[in-house]
Image (tube, rainbow, N blue to C red):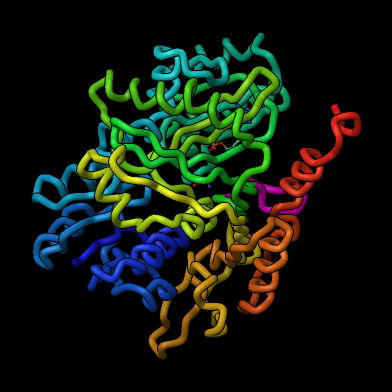
Amino acid sequence: MKILVVGGGGREHTVIRKLRENPAIETIWALPGNGGIAADATCVPIAATDIPAIVRFAVENQADYAVVTPDDPLVLGCVNALEAEGIPCFGPRAEAAIIEGSKVFSKHLMQKYGIPTACFATFDNMDAALSYLEDAPIPTVIKADGLALGKGVIIAFSREEAMDAVRGMMAEKRFGASGEKIVIEEYLEGPEVSVLAFTDGNAMVPMVSSMDHKRAGDNDTGLNTGGMGTIAPNPYYTAEIAQKCMNEIFLPTMRAMNAEGRRFKGCLYFGLMLTANGPKVIEYNCRFGDPETQVVLPLLETDLLTVMQAVTEERLSEIDVRFSRRCACCVILASEGYPVSYRKGFPLVIPEEIRGQVYVAGAAIREDGCLVTSGGRVAGCTAVADTLPEAIEQAYAIADCVHFENAFFRHDIGQRALKALQHNAAPSGEKEQ
Ligand code: AMP
Ligand code: GLY
């Protein structure tokens, strides 16, 4: 079997490694892949957003199946275009990917179907947005409607900051067309949980929960990034909360998309906040999260291709999707200066004995054959162990063995989760309120 994987980050490296466990797969092409992925797949220099070129390549090479994981090709209709040529795919069509592609769409969907989320208002006119802010509760959250590389969310702790954010998006067009419409929403508080779920529109199969660490610096300081590390499972996400999310969020979302004629097939990502008033949706993503995938897929015990094909063929309910009860931790090594500006092109050294535990996010192969850094996030060092403390310790030990000039990483990945675990284990009288 010949499979094409669209994308070229740490998430795609993880998906490719997991697919490789299936002996029926002879060839995996990564479009475009990256210098680290090249050890596990054939990289083809076609951009993940060049849909006509992706389709041409798939047809010419008679790909049997395609896995599309990044947000932009999904929102641009990559799956629709491949399916039109008869190539079965894993990933939602454009009409369903809009659940991530437009925050205005997803907020209205949640409102219409009673799915818990922050209270909000949407605007396509700046003056109306500014006058709304005159007496809106502060802090408040301003979100650009469209895709913005994870940067289109601004949490404003003063009215002035909120107004500046609106002007930045709507007048200065800081996020281009993505900010022509905006959402202004209620500021929520509570632990965050990421839940990825396989769904074919009939069944909803949540994967192991995880926790991302979005800020660049230790103790959640510094700028928001794509994610500096993850752990799984997330100790805040108890069986009771999981059940509530299934009934109040996951299944209602699946049914809502069906009712709108936008059946979602693929991996649906629920970004949740566990507030004092119950779990609420912070965001939907139409794809696997990065770096959530790096801790979730290593815990998947069922063959990934089997699950993906069941989603494509709408028979997910017929298969048993199993996860290990172990724990995982991923520590991201990034280039100093990420997420703003950083130097690249430094030799990246990954010792052979740990190669299987390093998912490469940003590397290229130089003309002389040397693997060099090529991105902000460079490598995800991942360990699976029986307990979370062991997984954290081992992920850091792997990170210590991967070298490139100007590397930086967070030192506290998993620490908040460990505190939650200690709290859960404490006799109830000793728990903090
Ligand atoms: P997003 O790109 O939508 O995931 O937002 C980035 C981050 O902003 C989230 O992970 C949250 O930490 C934070 N955030 C988004 N919406 C809210 C909200 N309504 N209240 C508080 N924090 C939020
Ligand atoms: N880690 C969050 C995301 O993939 O958007």
Left or right of 147? Residue 117 is right
- Residue positioned 59% across, 56% down in the render: 326
Image label count: 0
- Residue positioned 35% across, 51% down in the render: 69
Identity of the residue furthest to the right in this view: 430
User: Closer to the camera, 98 or 174?
Assistant: 98
Q: Is residue 224 magenta?
A: yes
Q: Which quadrant of the picture is home to ligand 1? A: top right
User: Closer to the camera, 354 or 347?
Assistant: 354
Q: Position of residue 142 (x, y in %)?
A: 57, 27
Q: Position of residue 67 (x, y in %)?
A: 28, 54
**Residue 301 visible to the viewer:** yes
Write the start and end of the magenta stretch as one range.
Answer: 215-225
Q: Which image quarter is the N terminus in? A: bottom left
In this view, 282 is above or below 47: above
Quarter of the image where one finds residue 18? bottom left
Left or right of 218? Residue 40 is left
**Residue 124 visible to the viewer:** no
Q: Position of residue 340 (x, y in %)?
A: 59, 55
In this view, 116 is above or below 284: above
Q: Is residue 7 magenta?
A: no
Q: Main secondary structure of the magenta part?
A: strand
